[in-house]
Image (cartoon, rainbow, N blue to C red):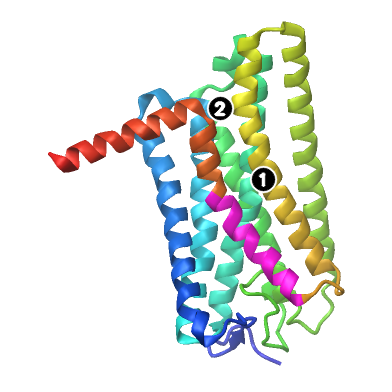
Amino acid sequence: MYENSSSAVLLTLETLDVSNANIYPAFIFGTLTYLLIMFSNLLVLATIAVSKTLHKPMFILLVNLPISDMMGATAFFPHFLFSMVVENRQISYHACISQAFLIHVYGIGNVLILSAMAYDRYVAICCSLKYNTIMSPNNLIKINIFIWLINVSLVVTLFLLLVRFKICRTNIVDLYCNNPSLMKLVCEDISVNNYYGLAITFLLQSVIVFTIIYTYAQILCTCVVMKQSAVWKKAFQTCGTHLLVFFILEINALFTLMAHRFNSVSPLLRKALGVSILIFPPVLDPLIYGLKTTELRKSIMMFLKRNVDSIRM
């Protein structure tokens, strides 16, 4: 048995299976991917912060998404890239718990943020006359606090249930630390943890999928009734983008969870699916919103132009 309180306990993450000849190309590719994630998400944040035309409920809620994406990417990439270069896949127990905690906050946070954004689009299109009242600054603050409070509370409970156990193994079956892989290090009865994990997964998915289906069904009905091309265009631009981001995250999360639940899934596929949820959403979210949302795209171009001109001067 290993005492969790001992900082001397080292865990070993799954090997990368990269040949010596490909280590540095893989390191460069990973570094560029991480830099792209940080640059594009920071660009979205900075643009919304300095552009007064974007100080609207939709974009204020959107601010949470790049913050969450950067958190997930930063929890994974720095240690992953460092271990690739030094060819040492060991990580301390406490660092592993910290990494897993941030990754789970990122995952749950994203689906909660996207649900709040779906509600915003529903109010904007279906209750347009009451939009400013419902999505007032005070209510926006409450929504943002609610998102992060629920998110952190669920994840804190998840890991409080985990850290009460002693571990009897040290090999993590994934490329990074997460709750399912950490639970496999425990030799005691983990029924309560499994029930809690399944319960929050079921409840979150039920509430979120219902919210998405209900809000977009109402938006579709409103567009059909109004029969105005401007309404259809607005709904397609904002809601289409939102649905695309939501489906990318959900599909990644669904296959990743299934890979952990079924032992028949190959380790290579499980590793690929696990990493994909930390790469594709953070890379694609700012690109999709930046390219498909007209207001944000124009503001980003103006923000970049202003900064390029100031550098030239």
186, above or below 282, in the image:
below
Q: Residue at x 72, y 14 (%)?
A: 223
Q: Nearer the viewer, residue 128 or 37?
A: 37
Report how far apart the C-alphas of labels 1 and 2 lie in the structure. Answer: 19 Å
Q: Locate residue 147, reporting x and y percent.
A: 61, 42
Q: Could you tell me which quadrant the N terminus lies in?
A: bottom right
Mark number, residue 139: 2
64, above or below 281, in the image:
above
Q: Is residue 124 visible?
A: no
Q: Residue at x 84, y 67 (%)?
A: 261
Q: Nearer the viewer, residue 253 or 31?
A: 31
Residue furthest to the front in view is: 21
Q: Main secondary structure of the magenta part?
A: helix
Which residue, given by chain and number where applicable, does mark 1 sit on? 111
Q: Residue at x 61, y 49 (%)?
A: 109
Residue 105 in which image quadrant: bottom right
Magenta span has 268?
Answer: yes
Which span is picked out in magenta? 267-283
Q: Residue at x 67, y 80 (%)?
A: 172
Secondary structure beneath dot 2 equals helix
Q: Nearer the viewer, mark 1 or mark 2?
A: 1
The amino acid type found where label 2 is placed reads Asn
* Sooner in the amino-acid sequence: mark 1 or mark 2: 1
Image-based side of 51 in relation to 267, left or right? left
Q: Nearer the viewer, residue 273 or 74?
A: 273
